[in-house]
Amino acid sequence: MLQIGDEVVYFSAVFLLVVLGTRSATGASLLTAFLYVFMVMFRFPPVPGDQAGRVLRPRAPSGGVPVVAHRGGSHDAPENTLAAIREASRNGATGVELDLSFTADGVPVLMHDETVDRTTNGSGPVSKLQLVQLKRLDAAACHRLKDKFSGEKVPTLQEAVEECIRHQLTIFFNVKDQPDKAVAVLHEMYKKFPVLYNSSIVSSFEPKVIYKMRQTDPNVVTALIHRPWRLSRFGDGTSRSLSTSGQLWMGVLDVLLDWAHHHILWKLCGVSAIFMQKDFISLDYVQYWAERGVEVVGWTVNTAVEKHYYQNLLKIGYITDSLLEDCDPHY
């Protein structure tokens, strides 16, 4: 829970900023009061701690921290496939992270990119392909182990959910866009497979997705995904904008977004976890969220040194592309 002291500091800061900007104490008071009432009326309480704990702290086979296979473990098997789910289970993962997308005929499937070009032998946007067309593609065609997994198909969401339940894996649903459609589909999955309430979490970079999910079904465990400076810079640190003014403006938006994630959005949505890019996590950061009843999960942790840091020092769960060996960093 947000501490009372936090609320005083945050809304005092808002008040001071508005006063400085408008030079009107009355206007600042009214706006601050409005924001406070809005937060009280429209925020969602988090799910019970024991339920969140079952999802975020399942017992690891080795007795260590939870380890989640990113896209099913994209280094060890073709990403977002049933083969990847089976490999992740075989290699000791406690869960898998899966990306939700939709075909032209509205069927929910697993696919990270907007197009099928990078991961299959096909081309074009997923949203322009019918399910029958998608099922003809080889989802292993571009993978480093394509001979071993040749002929692997792009699974539907339900096929993937059933496979995860069969292997008793926690599911980290990643929703990138289309919040209304995604939330409706996931809500149906939770009704069809009630075990998901204690074995899955819905996550997104977009707060509107998480808010919509909690609004539709407040019993679902949720998480916000965050990487500081993601609006102004790519994951490797290079600038997204060629102009100085564009870079400066996006940097300002990044600061505001980061502040909102840490002080407003998490409470408004009632999330149980923050999925943070691995390079921005420290013991102090983990403690900050622990005091608020929120779990921290790091992504994407791909080397033995990093995994040792997470397992033995931070003692928190992490998402990785491989459970078997070091692999290239994921941006």
Image (cartoon, rainbow, N blue to C red):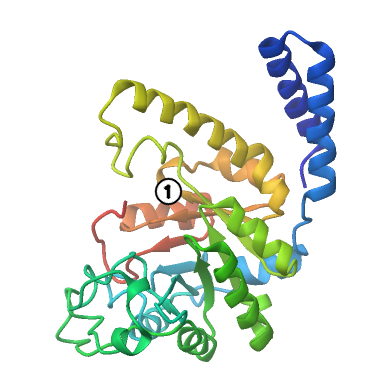
Residue 327's spot in the image, x, y percent?
A: 24, 61
Direction left: furthest residue = 147
Q: Is residue 274 above or below residue 282?
A: below
Which residue sits at x=17%, y=81%?
146
Which residue sits at x=66%, y=60%?
212
Residue 54's spot in the image, x, y percent?
A: 66, 72
Direction top: furthest residue = 23
- Towards the viewer: 331 or 89: 331
Which residue sits at x=79%, y=56%?
45
State the image quarter where residue 152 is shown: bottom left
Give the side of residue 316 with respect to residue 76, left or right.
right
Q: Is residue 27 above or below residue 217?
A: above
- Towards the viewer: 148 or 225: 225
Residue 261's spot in the image, x, y percent?
A: 60, 41
Q: Which residue is mark 1?
A: 278
Q: Amino acid at mark 1?
A: Lys
